[in-house]
Amino acid sequence: MFEKLFQLVKNNADKAVINNPTIQEKDHESVMTEASSSIIDVLKKQIESGRLKDLVTFFQIKGIYNNALVNSMINKFANRLNTYYGIAPNAAYKVAEELIPSVMVQLVQQTKNEKNMGTLFSQLNGNRTDLSGMVNGMMLAAS
């Protein structure tokens, strides 16, 4: 699942990363990895803080652009760009804002199409617990 997320980031990185003069060519791959890691970290934190139901709801909504979860991902990624790559805060935020929402729209859509939300959440949980049954129950309750 994480490989698919990285592929989504890579597929959406042209304007925000690859063709961005602010990001050095030698850093392209690692910046894309930072984007993936930022998304994973925010999703993982949701599960660890007991907000699995909120996460299930997030993956069921259509308009995620103005969502607090996506904003957290944008901020986390922008902070990493600033901290680790020396990109000015405004420029870092712009990169994150160009990349993260489009990746999340595709991740949500892909997860819905493949009906593997429980698998994704279990992987985020380090496969310590199979969350599929619980996630499926929450999805049924929400419908």
Image (cartoon, rainbow, N blue to C red):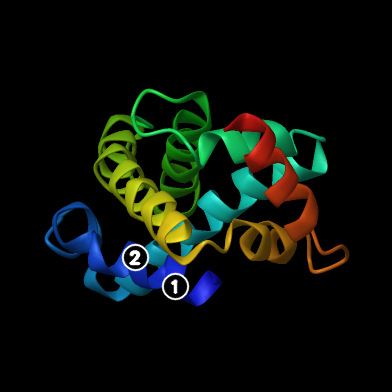
* Residue visible at 44% across and 25% down in the picture: 67
Q: Residues within 10 Å of mark 2 (few under 14, many from 20)?
A: many
Question: What label sits on residue 4 in the rendered view?
Answer: 1
Could you say where residue 95 lies in the image, as x and y percent from the top left? 27, 44
Give the left or right position of residue 140, taking residue 127 as reference: left
Horizontal side, residue 11 vs residue 111: left or right: left
Viewer-proximal residue among 90 and 113: 113
- Please tell me which residue is depicted at 36% across the width and 32% down the height of the picture: 89
Image-based side of 109 in relation to 45, left or right: left
Q: Relative to 79, does residue 114 appear above or below in the rendering?
A: below
Q: Amino acid at mark 2?
A: Leu
Q: Label 1 is placed on what type of residue?
A: Lys
10 Å crowding of disc 1: few (<14), some (14-19), many (20+): few
Assign the N terminus to one quadrant of the image: bottom right
Q: Which mark is residue 31?
A: none
Would you name the residue on which mark 2 appears? Answer: 8
Q: Quadrant of residue 125?
A: bottom right
**What residue is drawn where x is 52% and y is 61%?**
115
Q: Relative to residue 82, is residue 106 depicted above or below?
A: below
